[in-house]
Image (tube, rainbow, N blue to C red):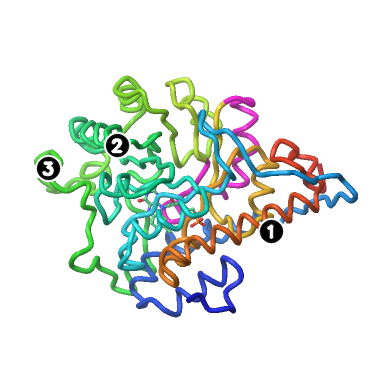
Amino acid sequence: PIPAKIVSLQDYVDAAARALPAPTWAYLAGSGADGLTRAENRAAFDRLRLRPRVLADVAGGHTRLSLLGQSLTHPIIVAPMAFHKLAHPGAEEATLLGAAARDALAVVSAQASMDMTTLADGTSGPLWFQLYLQPLREASLRLVRRAEAAGYRALVVTVDAPVNGIRNEEARAGFALPRGISAVNLAGLPAPESPPAEGGSAVFDGLMPAAPTWEDIAWLRAQTDLPILLKGILDPDDAARAISLGAQGVIVSNHGGRVLDSGLSALDALPAIRAALGPQPAILMDGGIRRGTDVLKARALGADAVLVGLPLLAALAVGGAVGVSHALEILRTELEVAMALTGCKTLSDVSSKTLWNS
Ligand code: FNR
């Protein structure tokens, strides 16, 4: 049973921090370097003020939306996260059960700790697959074909982590993946012979030659009919380039502040990207969403929908599928309360006017 004291997403984060072994928590909640970007993701939400509106007739309102041609009950999506087994033995299967119970779209990570086909077969909820482009195109293609065959409805291509961030919290805590937990979907993929790492730069000569570039996005677009979203976009020019190469949308994100530190918050990056792309392309955002009012603020600045990361893994750790379902319900209810109190009957009523100073 979920402790009665847990009533918010942050309560789940705090409870998980107490419950999990310190090294595991350092991996799950750890930031890049000094955590400046992770803190900024939150601070950006906290700086904004909403505009209360009274006596509006919002009876019969709802949170429904259409995204990439899919009908969703609400705009709260489970972010792709590696290794759910670290949080709970029920792993991704339990997360998806909790998500399906609340009609939440979920994105399965390329680094999931359970088989992507088994996961898709086992859930009634809508799923997208998060892809890291692999050093060999043949390997990426295998993942794409598996995603298509398993019924995933879109590809989320994460482009902001071609190298690991400077993960000091994780390193200090001495985190290592426990035996029995691994990225099972990446096992056995064709891989290049590892280059001799003599002398040169580990980053520029070791890792980056195998990292994807825009050409690979153009290539991927030609390989599949699935909608493609690029995740980890913060710059309007990058966003425009993604769309011009045939992506259906972008996810404005800094990976929860886990990679580049000192970058700007995802929320602050949002308005210029919506301005650059215009009303049509799908724009999602993540990083720091903890309250229904945050969902409203993201929507007011141009996001169609949001993804939630760490709090849902924390809820999984504390309460398994029930925890995930509860956390999603909390957030959805908070969103509805915030909409009602700002006079928004539907998500299309949420606009820059929903914010105080605009
Ligand atoms: C992530 N994230 C992530 N993103 C991705 O594209 N592929 C991945 O495998 C992972 N793995 C991962 C593991 C863990 C433990 C966390 C917390 C996050 C990033 C994730 O999708 C999302 O961008 C952020 O988590 C959003 O920020 P919040 O909601 O955690 O503040």
Q: In the image, is 132 to the left or to the right of 196?
A: right
| Marker disc for residue 15 | none
Tag 3 residue: 195
- At a point 41% along the width and 69% down the height, the residue shown is 317
The x, y position of residue 233, in whole percent, is 49, 38
Look at discs 3 and 2 and give the one toward the viewer. Answer: 2
> Along the polypeptide, which appears first: circle 2 or circle 1?
1
> Along the polypeptide, which appears first: circle 3 or circle 2?
2
Tag 1 residue: 46
Using the numbered discs, state the Cα–Cα distance from disc 3 to disc 2 in whole angstroms: 29 Å
Is 9 colored magenta in this rendering? no
Nearest the eye: 190 or 307: 307
Q: Secondary structure at mark 3?
A: loop
Q: Say if residue 262 shows up in the picture.
A: no
The x, y position of residue 238, in whole percent, is 49, 31
Q: Residues within 10 Å of mark 2 (few under 14, many from 20)?
A: many
Q: Say if residue 39 shows up in the picture.
A: yes
Q: Residues within 10 Å of mark 1 (few under 14, many from 20)?
A: few
The x, y position of residue 193, in whole percent, is 9, 41
Nearest the eye: 290 or 76: 76
Given the current orientation, which residue lies at the most extreme right position?
Answer: 55
| Marker disc for residue 147 | 2
Look at discs 1 and 3 and give the one toward the viewer. Answer: 1
